[in-house]
């Protein structure tokens, strides 16, 4: 039974290692589903192997991520997200907020490449989240590489989501319509530039992801932590594995049976840089997520209410909530009506 005790920290928890290739082996399938069910239910976090993404692909995306952040600041600021009503582009270090405090990281937000929507006054504001990306002129190969990566990971996430539904005894195609045509894919290239001069160690503050599934590629530095038994525990990098976690929409859809778990990144020490590339697999913005049917519901506790973080079953609303909270300067510039005075 694969169970990881990753190398770097003696206190690291055992996080399940789920080998997706076992899903296709009739002799292994039942055990695979049992393990996936337990991992999703237990922490909502797991290591995913057997996903079919090659070492060369992951090396390439990390290499380009490093290359992006090595560009002169002027080249990065040329694609600032302040230019984008769609929250796409570059956020400078310290300009993203989580829990009201600055995250000590910079990042490039990318999504599905689509034209800017033409919206009327009655259209939901979350449709602004669709639109074109901003790409750095100084690194022309980034566009094709990131969009290709995003499509590859979407296919893995799609398989995994269907297996997860099967694992809890639900119809595997339950979300297919919600994801059809225009899934809201999102990829972030991130750099954590070491400790903040203030001494604060918030790489990214504790949060839940807003959508369905996150597939995270992290380099070898470490710093990711998840809540467990009331405290934070390290999720060390595991070569060849993605860290997968569940987002708020899966918690809503399963009435709290599956949970979106709080996680954060502690800044690397001193001048050590850490790079990571989370990919967020999300449905159409206008999808309204119904409860997934199944026997499992007998054990579902209901969604936990947190007044500081209202959850919305209309996916676009839930996603927009997150963007406005994390990037208030973009919201103030382009969508002032969404920002409370
Ligand atoms: O960089 C990481 O390891 C995690 C980032 C994360 O949780 C996020 O951006 O939602
Ligand atoms: Fe996250």
Image (cartoon, grey):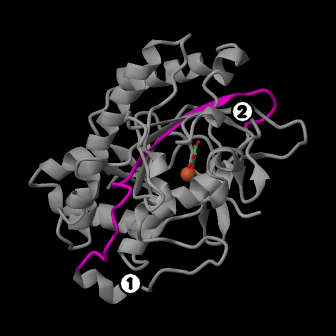
Mark 1, Cα crowd under 10 Å, few <14 / some 14-19 / many 20+, is: some
> Image quadrant for the C terminus?
bottom right
Picture residue at 72% right of the left edge, 18% below the top: 73
Q: Locate residue 263 relative to residue 257 in the image: left or right.
A: right
Examine the rendered structure and indicate whether residue 80 appears above or below residue 111.
above
Q: Of the numbered discs in the image, which one, if any, rests on residue 92?
A: 2
In front of the other: 271 or 81: 81
Q: Of the numbered discs in the image, which one, if any, rests on residue 338?
A: none
Mark 2, Cα crowd under 10 Å, few <14 / some 14-19 / many 20+, is: some
Q: Are marks 2 and 1 in contact (CB under 8 Å)?
A: no
| Tag 1 residue | 300
Chain part drawn in magenta: 268-293
In front of the other: 139 or 243: 139
Farthest right residue in view: 198
Residue 274 within the segment the image draws in magenta = yes
In front of the other: 338 or 154: 338
Q: Position of residue 285 (x, y in %)?
A: 38, 56
Picture residue at 16% right of the left edge, 55% below the top: 28
Picture residue at 55% right of the left edge, 18% below the top: 136
Q: Position of residue 65 (x, y in %)?
A: 54, 24
Tell me if I can see residue 154 in this picture. Answer: yes
Sequence-wise first label, 2 or 1: 2
Farthest front residue in view: 121
Q: Mark 2 to mark 1: distance in Å?
A: 41 Å
């Amino acid at each position: 039974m694969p169970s990881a005790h990753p190398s770097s920290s003696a206190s690291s928890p055992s996080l399940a290692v789920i080998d997706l290739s076992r899903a296709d082996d009739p002799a292994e399938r039942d055990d695979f589903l049992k393990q996936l069910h337990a991992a999703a239910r237990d922490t909502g976090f797991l290591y995913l192997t057997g996903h079919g993404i090659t070492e060369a692909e992951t090396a390439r995306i990390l290499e380009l991520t490093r290359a992006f952040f090595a560009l002169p600041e002027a080249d990065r600021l040329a694609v600032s997200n302040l230019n984008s009503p769609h929250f796409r582009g570059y956020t400078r270090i310290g300009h993203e907020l989580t829990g009201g405090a600055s995250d000590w990281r910079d990042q490039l937000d990318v999504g599905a490449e689509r034209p800017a929507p033409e919206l009327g006054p009655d259209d939901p504001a979350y449709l602004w989240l669709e639109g074109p990306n901003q790409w750095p002129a100084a690194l022309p190969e980034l566009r094709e590489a990131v969009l290709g990566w995003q499509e590859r990971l979407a296919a893995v996430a799609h398989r995994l989501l269907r297996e997860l539904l099967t694992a809890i005894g639900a119809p595997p195609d339950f979300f297919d319509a919600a994801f059809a045509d225009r899934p809201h894919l999102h990829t972030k290239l991130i750099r954590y530039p070491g400790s903040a001069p203030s001494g604060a160690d918030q790489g990214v503050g504790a949060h839940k992801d807003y959508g369905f599934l996150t597939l995270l590629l992290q380099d070898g530095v470490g710093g990711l932590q998840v809540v467990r038994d009331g405290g934070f525990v390290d999720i060390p990098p595991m070569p060849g594995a993605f860290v997968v976690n569940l987002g708020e929409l899966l918690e809503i859809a399963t009435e709290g049976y599956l949970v979106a778990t709080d996680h954060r990144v502690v800044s690397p020490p001193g001048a050590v840089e850490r790079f990571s590339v989370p990919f967020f697999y999300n449905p159409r913005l206008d999808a309204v997520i119904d409860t997934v049917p199944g026997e499992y519901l007998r054990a579902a506790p209901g969604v936990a209410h947190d007044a500081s973080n209202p959850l919305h079953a209309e996916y676009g609303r839930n996603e927009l909530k997150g963007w406005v909270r994390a990037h208030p300067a973009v919201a103030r510039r382009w969508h002032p009506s969404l920002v409370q005075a």
